[in-house]
Structures are given as structure tokens and as C-alpha cells.
Image: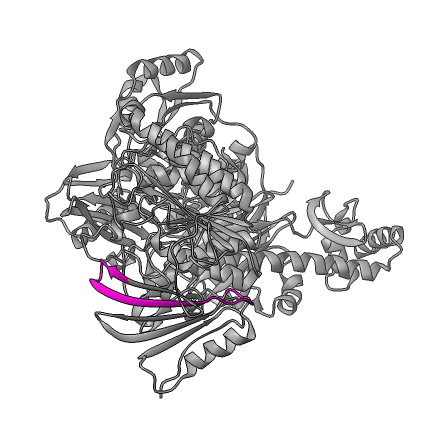
Amino acid sequence: MLKAASSLGVIFFPAFDWAISPTHPEREERLLYTQDQFREEGLFDVEGISEHRPLFATDQDIMRAHFCFPSVDAICTESHRISAGGAIQAARLVLEGETRRAFALVRPPGHHAMKVVHGNRGFCNINIEAVMVEWIRAHYGAKRIAIVDTDCHHGDGTQDVYWHDPDVLFISLHQDGRTLYPGSGFPYENGGPRALGKTINIPLPPRTSDEGYLYALENVVLPILADFKPDLIINSAGQDNHYSDPITNMQFSAQGYARLNELLKPDIAVLEGGYSIKGALPYVNLGICLAMAGCDYSGVREPDFNAAALREEPETMEYIKQSCGPLLDGYFHPARGDFEKQGEYFVRERKIYYDTDGILEKQREELKDCEHCRGLRLIKTSSSQILPCLGVELPIDCCPACEREGYEAFNRKGDEFLVAQMLDQKNKQFAYRPKG
Amino acid sequence: MRIGIDIGGTHTDGVLIAGTRLVAAAKAPTNHDNLLESISAVLQAILTDQDPARVQTLNLSTTLTTNAIVTGRIDPVGMLVVGGPGIAAKHYRIGEHFHLIYGSLDHLGTETSALDEQDLEEAINACCEQGVKCFGVASKFSPRNPAHEDRIREELGDRADFVSLGHLISGQLNFGRRIHTVYYNSAVWRTFRAFAGALAASLQGFDLQAEVNILKADGGAVPLTRAMDAPVQSIFSGPAASVMGILATCTADADLLMLDIGGTTSDIALFAGGEPLLEREGIAIEGRPTLVRAIRVESIGIGGDSLIHLDGAEVKTGPQRLGPCMATGGSAPSLMDALNVLGLADFGQTERSREGLEALAAQHHLEARTLAQAAVDAALNAIAAKIETLVRMVNSKPVYTIHEILEDREITPKKLIVIGGPAAVFKELLAARLGMEVIVPPLHGVANAIGAALARATSHLALTANTSRGQLSAPMLGIFRAIPRGFSLQDAIDEARRLLKADLEQAGVTIAAEEIQITQADAFNMVDGSYTSGKNIRVVAQVRPAVVARLELDAAAVPVRFAGQS
């Protein structure tokens, strides 16, 4: 009988009664065959691998991570709260020491959900990793956390949530944004003025296979992690780099995914995308679980796997090797971006499109260039669906001046904002402005 | 009238029941080398002055298969296993004749590599050369497609006396458990067959014409003739008989707990809304998980004979047992002795209990009563902790739908039913420790036999349908056939009910339609590209464990006869 070298808790929640629409990739059937494979393999009979049910994310849990407009309920259905609750359960298992590692195999996903949420982007409503990370910090104090996003799509949502946070290192490996949704994730996107180099983007050319992907992991990601020395490593584990995925163009395999997790050694993994539900997910998920548990995964193989046919072209491999040096250097010597400044505020004005819900958001972010703390952040946002709303975020080390200014903005009567939300990391206060 | 016989580790109990009335009860020592002798002894006692021809049913719960496995009196089994990609089949190696045959199926049942005929022939020859006549056959994903298992059965032909095929044992997925299950099933087959033959002959001697059933680990009765195909199901039926005994003697309509206190160990079971909970997938045999359906019973190393010992300054009770308690001639003080010293029990030679406790206490500079109290507290704490863990685990069992997360009712037992020898002694102690109502039902001494007597048939069936491929399968019945594209979830539910009912009728069991529960009914839209290609339907139907009647409470008036003591 097989035995786990490091214990693993799996929160398997396939949400068999939830879909975006009946034929949408994010539908009831998505984890059905993964469940069949797990059951047939007897994964939860392996000593040291256990199955757990998700917790349920509350309004407070979500408001620690997001500005939801006009309200949390308008953005989140029960499915999103349970999916985020699955990630929270994974964190709880690990931080309470019940299991050495945990994998939240839950849906719907979350890594395209940004700090401000008006609706669904890229199948995501709330960022389940971010809700989890904030839950960890709220319950276990300040932690240095590394999120490594291995989904094929750029984790633009997670990048946005932690853009200004120097305590959270965000690394995304993904298919080059010039060839795939959401079209971002270039190396020059390297963090806000107060968190330079704490966002790392590693775009990979289409048709990258196991060798190229793992080369980037070993030559960029692992050295950066060794320097950053996080308390926790989180794998934002999409499975759509797989060669059979219907909506991407990569050539990664189940063996590659297992090796990735063996090398990365994440404390927590959270499922993101991956829509080859018959040909990839059953094998990739099995490979990830076995690798995380320190079990032999050498027998995990897709029925149609052909290593020779999937291997990347020499030019692709050469391109990846060439790009790794500058990418690593970008962490140690981050180039300072072209930050616009008005008075004592850094200002960003953006338009964000929510593809799933067809919403266009207009956003103005102001970050105070404060000498005493990370700076008060004000986000003014409106969309094709909603009047202007205000988000006020006080950082964990907020100084008295920023705190006063933030609360003044939040409590100002008769301003132009339909809704205002306070995200006070310092005093752990998360609230909407009372009506009237 | 019905007869129930429970062959336990120490005693064999028998009862005769007419309708809801207990007519006779008897106990005899269990002779593990000759179970028929023990059966005959209790039959003799309970049939005194009775007309055997009026007995319609005889249900038997036996340790036969359990003991055969524990003592190693089993047949060698030729294991023919087809693995394929994933967790390697070698990790499930069991027995001395374990052979891997190359070939594989995927999760949809598609053959991804053909069965290697040469591997197969070599494996069978190797088994035959070593005189192996019983075989276990299991392929990964065989409930999705039995082709490889069927082919192996065909190739074995008459070279095998008995073959267990994985897909016929259970329709549930779990390759490792399937391997273990076919192994144990084939390993105990010959022992079971010999016993069944001798039993039939023995019953004729009593002029019994009754239909004979064997109690299964899930608390259901299965006709002896049918038990021959799957003798492994009769394993661990003792705890199941206890649970059925609760159903037969108590009002079980709420969440409640059962504690069966024995000499070495105690068993704990949980009833949700009065229904005993089953293991999710199946019971483990010798630490090997199987697909044998079973009532979920947690065992704890606390019993009347549990040894009292000190670990540093901490007083511990169990899990070791060094023979009986001192009050009945043992050599070291046990839990029962502590109860004697505290005046909570008056069992055997209480003076010896006192001497034993005093001697141990003196060694550690303690008062005997202090030591006794600490030992009883340790036992109660261990029981309370086990109960708490069981309830927490059941309440945190995984679920797969949003509906279940939101609607699942938490199980909160408020009542504990205690059976077993020292049950009455523990009643008040447990009530105080657990803060629950504690009940000791009348006639708890033969509750297991009563449970066996009144147990009805159980059954289950897993059915899957894939309308995109136009296939329906009910693996346990060997049914794999075509269906039309329009086959619906309701069609599948109706079919599962019909098949389950027909299968039970074939075994001679009639069951009302409403007794069949549908425990899973899901239909998944299957999408290829962006078009719906069909539905993937999964239905599980079951007849849950239940009793045919509840005993009248004045049953306590019937004396238990002690039979066959030499």
C-alpha cells in the first residue's frame, strides 16, 4: 500500500450543481472524470492523503481582499463563497498543522478577479487565492507569501490585488500575452512603486512543453523563491498548459505538472483553469496530488501521451533560455516603471473589460506617496452598469495621517459616490458606508 | 417463527422469535474448531418444546470468514490484475500469487491498450503449476468496461474451481479495494462452502425446513445459496448484528449512538435519524480497504478486562488486556476490578479486585480508590473522545454539491444505547460523563442474536448511463447494454429500481418498491467542442439495513438458557 511522504489534505469540491451556462467550459461536468480517476485510483485510501469539505467564505472574508460593487452579494453567489471557502480550508489545514500540504481542488476559479470587482472576468468573480491569503494574515498574523501562478493564462487578477504589496511575491508563468487572453503579463509589469520586483511575469512561447516550462521554473522561479524566503508558497494551479486543452496552445503534460509541484513544493495549491476535462484533468490532478504528497507519480500518464511528438522546437527552447537571464535579473534589479504622479499621489487610470459579463469598468487609483507608511489608496470606479463607487484601503502599517484622511473620504456625506467601501487592514475594519 | 444465531468470539447466542415476541433465548460457548457444535447447542436449547417446522427463517451471523482470515486458514489465490497508467498496481500486491497482466482502460471504459494474452497465459500457468485453484481477477476501471476481466474468466475456463471478478463484486470505482475484495472473496470461498454444506446437513437433523440466511457486514440477510458467490460479505457481521439488535429492541428514530462493551474492546456506531451509518466505500480487512459494504463501527481498546497501568504519573486503562479481570481469576487489575473497588459493580470475587488495586496503588504511593477512580475516568475519557471524533468525522464528510453544503443537517446524537456484558454498570457513569441520556435495553445479553433474527435483506446497485455513447451499465449484474439517445435520468432511476427488485426476487426476496432508496441520481451535460453530445448519468439505489419487526418490551421476561457447557 502506498504511503504519503508528506501528508496532503485535498478539498475536492466539484460543485456538481453549478455552471456558468450549460455548455460553458465552467460547467457541472468539469471535475466529474477527475473524481472518477481519484475514486478508481483510491487516492484517499493512500495513507496520509485525506479528503475534506470546503468552508464557507463570509462577507468579511471577501471584504478583506476585494472592493465589491455595489455589494458582496451582487458579486458572489454561494458557489463563489464555497470555492473561496475551499481555499480557506486548505490554508486552515496547513496552518493548524493538520496536514503538511493542501490542495483546494475547487471551482469556480478566481485568478482573473482583481482588487475591484464588478462582475465576472475570465470565468472568475472573486479571487479565491487572495481571499485565502487575507484570511491567513487575519488569523495567523503577517506572513511573507509567494503565489506562483501556473495557469496558462496570465494571473492578472492576483497581480492586481498584490500590485502594491511588498509582502506578497507574485510570479506568473503563462502563455505569451500576445497570443492568449487576457493579453497581459509582460516582464515590464513588475509591481507598483512600493513593491517593485515583487511581481514577476514569465511569458512562455506557444507550444512550450515539459522541458521549457521546467527550465523556466528551475532557472527563474526557484532562485527568486530562494531569495524571497516566503513563509508559505501557494501554487495557483491552473491545468490549461496541457497539450489537450481546448482553449490554449501549450504542450505541457501530466508528468510535467507533477514534476513542477515536486520542484516547487507548494504548501498550498488552488485549482484555477483547465478545461480538457477528459483528456487532461484526471491525470494532471492525480499527478499533482501524488507529487505534493511525495508519492511515486511515475505511472501517471495520459493514454495518448507521446513525449517525442510534444517536445518543443529547438528554437522555442533557445528563446526560453535566452529570456530567463533577464527575467531573473528583473527580480534582483527591478526597472522602475513610468509611474504618473499628481501632487503627493501616484495615479493610475485604467479601463478594464469583464469578458464573461460584458462590463466595461473605468477606474482611477490614487496611492499616497507617504513617508511613514505604505500609503493610503483610493480607488474611484464606475462601469457601464453602475455609477461611481469609492474604495478606500488603509495599509497594514497605516500612519495616523493616512488613517485620518482615509476615514474622511469614506465618511464624506453627499459626495458623488453611489457606494463607498472601507478596507482597513490596520484596524481590521471592513465595511460599506452606511446609507443616508 | 424466526431463529437468529450470533456466533461471537466467546459465546454463541441463539433466539427464537414469533412475530414480535421473544419465545426462547440461549447461550453456548463458541467452539472455533467446530462452529456447528455451537450452533447445534443453541438450536437444541431454543427448540425445546417447539415445532421446528414452524420456523420459516434462520439468520446466522458467523465469525467463520473473519476467523479463517485471521488464523490464515485460507486458500491460496491466483491474482490476475490488469493495471495500466496511474498509481501502479504493484502497490496493491496481496497473497503469494500476484500477477500483473499488461493492458489498460481509461475512465470512460475505452480500451487504451489491449490485454496481453501472453502475460495472461504465463500467469495462469504459473498458478496452475503451484496448484492454485481459486482466482481473483481485477482490472482498473472494470465497472466501466468488463472486457478484460471477462476475457480472463474465459481463459481460466475449468482450470479454476472459483473465480471472483471485480466488476461483479461491486459497481463502485476503486481499483485497490477491488483487488483486495476479490482476493479475500476467493480466499474464504472453500471454507465457506464446506461450512454451508455441513450447516445444511446439520439443520436437517433438527427437522428445520427454514430458509437459511447469512448476515452481512451491512446488517442485511442474504440467502445462503447466494452468499456462496460472495462469501466475503459475511465478514465482521458481529458488530452489524449488534446494530440490528438496537433497531430490533429500541425506538431508534433520532440521532443516537450505540456502545457495545466487550471484554477487550468496545464498538461504537452512529445512527442518523435512526438509520445506522454505513462505511463510505467499504470495510478494511487486515488493514486492507475493500469494497465490502458494512455498517460503520469504530472499535476502541476499552473493555471490562482492559489493563490498568501507569505511564509516569498518568493512570491508563487499556488498550492492552492480560486475560480476564482479577475478580474472575486474572493476574493483573483491570477496568472491571476498578469498578468493583469503587462499589459500582459487584462482579465475581470483589475481594481479589481490591487486593489487585491495592497492590498496584501501593507501588505508586496511591490510595486504591484514587487509582480505581482515575482508571475509570481514563476509560470514560477515551470513550468520550472516540465518540466526539466519530461525530465530527461524519459531520465533516466530503460533499460535492452546493445544495449539500447549504442544506446538510448536522448529526447531533443526544442518546446513547449501551449493550454488552457490563452495560448496566456503565449506565450512570456514561450519562454523567457524556451528558446524554443513556439507555440499557432489556435483554442486551442476546441483542446480537435478536438483531440477526430480525434483519431483512439489503442490496445496492450502481448504474451508469452515457447517452453520447448509447451505453448503460449495471456492473454488479453483469449488465452492459445499448440505450437510445433520449434515455433520461428518470429512465435510469426507474431502471435501477427495476433491476434491483428483479435481482432480489431472483434470490427469493420480495421487497416493497418504496423500500428502495435512490441515494445518488445525477445527470451531467456532456459537451464536445461547444455542443451537447449527451448525458452522463449516475444512479445508485439501495435497500438499507432494517429489521422486519421490533420486539415487544416484555421480552425481558424470557430467561436465557445456558447450553452445551461441558
Q: Residue A416 at x, y = what percent? A: 31, 81
- Exactly how many numbered labels are in the figure? 0
Against B319, is A297 above or below?
above
Using the image as rendered, state which of residue A346 and residue A410 is in the foreground: A346
Against A103, is A121 above or below?
below
Using the image as rendered, state which of residue A244 and residue B82 is in the foreground: A244
The reply to whether the magenta stretch includes residue A34 is no
* Residue B223 located left or right of residue B444: left
Q: Residue A250 at x, y = what percent? A: 28, 36
Using the image as rendered, state which of residue A52 and residue B303 is in the foreground: A52
Range covered by the magenta-colored residues: A351-374
x 27%, y 54%: residue? A122
x 53%, y 61%: residue? A137
* Residue B369 located left or right of residue A13: right
Q: Which quadrant of the rendered structure holds the C terminus of chain A?
A: bottom left
Q: Residue B500 at x, y = what percent? A: 25, 47
The reply to whether the magenta stretch includes residue A353 is yes
Q: Quadrant of residue B419?
A: bottom right
Residue B24 seen by the camera: no
Q: Quadrant of residue A239?
A: top left
Q: Residue furthest bottom?
A: A436
The type of colouring in the image is one colour
Residue B310 seen by the camera: yes
* Residue A246 located left or right of residue B338: left
Q: Residue furthest front?
A: A343
Q: Residue B300 at x, y = what percent? A: 60, 50
x 34%, y 87%: residue? A414
